Image: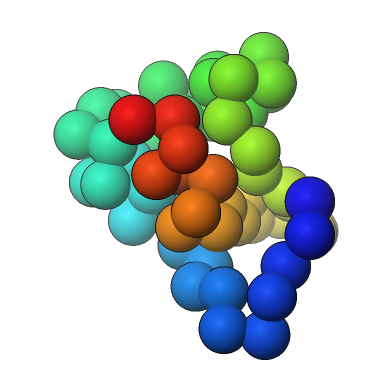
Amino acid sequence: MFVTPQETFLTLAEAAEALACDPATVRRLAAEGQIVGRKPGRAWVFTASSLAAHT
């Protein structure tokens, strides 16, 4: 995942709200590789552009 300096990062809850689904669904989509997410430590993070590409 290439990140530009202006990239906006979203938490799991924010990503779920953006995709209008449950946080568990967002975790599953990320685990299956359907959306791009990273887990630096304990929390998932997503880029706004990767979520926009999924919708």
Report x, y in % for residue 21.
25, 28
Residue drawn at x 54%, y 45% as measured from the top left = 50
Report x, y in % for residue 55.
34, 30
Q: Quadrant of residue 43?
A: bottom right
Residue drawn at x 49%, y 73% as measured from the top left = 8
Residue drawn at x 79%, y 59% as measured from the top left = 2
The relative height of residue 13 versus residue 55 in the rendered view (above or below) is below
Report x, y in % for residue 44.
62, 50
In this view, the residue in front, 40 or 53, is 53
Q: Quadrant of residue 4?
A: bottom right
20 left or right of 15 in image? left
In this view, the residue in front, 35 or 45, is 35
Q: Can residue 11 be seen in this view?
A: no
The relative height of residue 19 versus residue 5 in the rendered view (above or below) is above
Looking at the image, the residue that sits furthest to the bottom is 5
Q: Can residue 32 be seen in this view?
A: yes
Number of callouts: 0
Looking at the image, the residue that sits furthest to the top is 32
The relative height of residue 37 versus residue 8 in the rendered view (above or below) is above
